[in-house]
Amino acid sequence: MSRRNFLRGIGACVALPAFTSLLPTKVLAAAADARLATTATGAPLRTAFVFFPNGAIPSRWWPTDSGAAMNLSPTLQSLDPVRRYVQVLGGLAHANANPGNDGGGDHARGNSVFLTGVRINKSATDIRAGVSIDQVIANHVGHLTRFPSIELCCDATRRASDCDSGYSCAYQYNISWQSPTTPMTPESNPRLAFERLFGAGPHGERAQNAQRQMRDRRSVLDFVMGDAKAMQQRLSVRDQEKLDQYLTGIREVEKRIQKAEKFGPNIDPDEATPAGIPAKQVEYVDLMYDIMLLAFKTDSTRVATFVLGHDGDNRSFSEIGITEGHHDLSHHQNNPERIEKVAQIDRWYVEQFSRFLARMDSIQDVDGNSLLHNSRIIYGSGNADGNRHTHENLPVLLAGAGGGAFHGGRFVQHGSKPLSNLFLNLAETAGVTGLERFGDSTGRLADV
C-alpha cells in the first residue's frame, strides 16, 4: 500500500479519507511499534501543545471534586461534552520560570520555559533557552510525515530586541525551540500556514502548483550551489566560513525539497484557502485550530504547537464586551469587577479549545477511533495567577487518550511536581528512548 491514496485526474490529486480497509493487516494486528509513534492499533499518534496567555483566575479554574467525580468549574464548563477525554492536572509547576536572581520578566519566562523547563539566559541579545519537548518528539517521529512539526500563533504583530525586563523578544513570542539558540517561529497568517501545508491555489491545482514551485526552488538551489563553489577558491578563510554557514542553510532547504519529493504530491483537502487574518478574534482562533486539525487529519505532521497569545498579551475582547487589555486586567489587585472580566476571557479561550476537541472527536481515524482518541493535547499557560506572576500549580489540561495510554474524565492532584515530568511521559509514549531527564524533571509523572 502506498503511503497516501489518491484519485488522480487531469492535473489534479485529491486526497481520499483514511479507509480502515486500506490499512495493512500487519499494522492493524501488530502491537504499537514505539519507534513509529503509533497507537496500539497502528494509527498515528498526534501530539499538540496549546498555550494561552496571562494565567487564569485560580478560583474559577479548578474543579471542586477530585478524580472521576470532577465537577467542572465555570471556566472549564464548556469541556463537558468531551470530558471523558479531559484530565485536569493540578500541582504542576515550572520552578525555572520563577524570578530567582533574575528579577522581572515573568512573561518572557512563562513563554520560553513552558515547553523547555530550563532557566533561560536573561539578555536581549545572548539568547539561550533549551530544546522544547515538542521538538524532542518531532526529532524522533518527524521523518514519518511531510512536516516534522508545525508552529502556529495568533500574534500578528511581533516586536524585536528587548520585550520584557531585559529579556529578548525571542523569549516573549516563542514556546517551541529547535535548539537553545534557535526558536521555531510560529506562523500567524492562516493563508500562509495553509499554503505551506497544502500548496497555493484552489482545490485541484495545489499539488501541481507545489511541484512547479519545488522545481523552481531546485533550479535556484542548483544555480546558487554551482556559483558558490566557483567563488569559494577566491575567498579568505574567514569568508569561507561565512559561505559555509550560508551553504548549510541552503542544504537544509535542499533536504526539505528532497523530503517533499519522497512523499510525492501534496495532500489537497477539499477546503478553501483562507483569505488571511480574519478581523474577528473568534474567527482567527477557530481558523488556526482548523488548520492544525487538517494537518493531523491528513497526517501531514504529528506534532504541533499553537500560541493563542504570548504571555503578557494585552489584546481586548470587545466581541464579548471587554474593552480593556487582557494583561492589564490580569493585574486585578483583587478587584471583583476586573476578576470577573479575566474569568470571562479565560472561559472564552476554553470555549474555543472545546470546539476544537469536539471536531477532533467527530473525525474517524484509520483504526475506527476518533482523532481525539489518538491524540495527546496539552492546554495550559506559563503563568498560574497572572495577578501575582506565580508559576506553581499551573493551569494545565491533558486532552485525548493517546490511543488508550491516558485516562480521562477526571481531576488529578499531583502535589508539587515539575511540569517537565509530564513531558517525559509524552516523550516515552511517542517512542523516544533513553530520555531520563528533561528540563527540571524529577521522574515520570505517575497516574496520568
Image: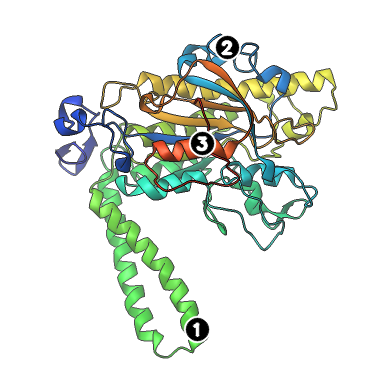
Q: Position of residue 201 (x, y in %)?
A: 34, 43
Q: CA distance from mark 3 to mark 1?
A: 47 Å
Q: Is residue 318 left or right of residue 211?
A: right
The residue singled out by tag 1 in the image is 239
Query: Foreground residue, 153 or 405?
Result: 405
Residue lying at 34% horizontally and 57% vertically, measured from the top left = 256
Could you tell me if the residues under marks 3 and 2 are in contact, i.e. CB atoms within 8 Å?
A: no
Above or below for 258 versus 303: below
Against 248, is 137 above or below? above
With respect to residue 292, does 259 lie above or below? below
Q: Is residue 374 visible?
A: yes
Query: Circle 3 sits on which residue?
Result: 444
Say which element carries label 1: helix
What x and y, as percent, mark residue 271? 35, 32
x 25%, y 38%: residue: 204
Q: Nearer the viewer, mark 1 or mark 2?
A: 2
In the figure, is residue 350 to the left or right of 392? left
Residue 94 sits in quarter: top right
Residue 321 percent across, percent down from the top left: 71, 20
Sequence order check: which comes first, mark 3 or mark 1? 1
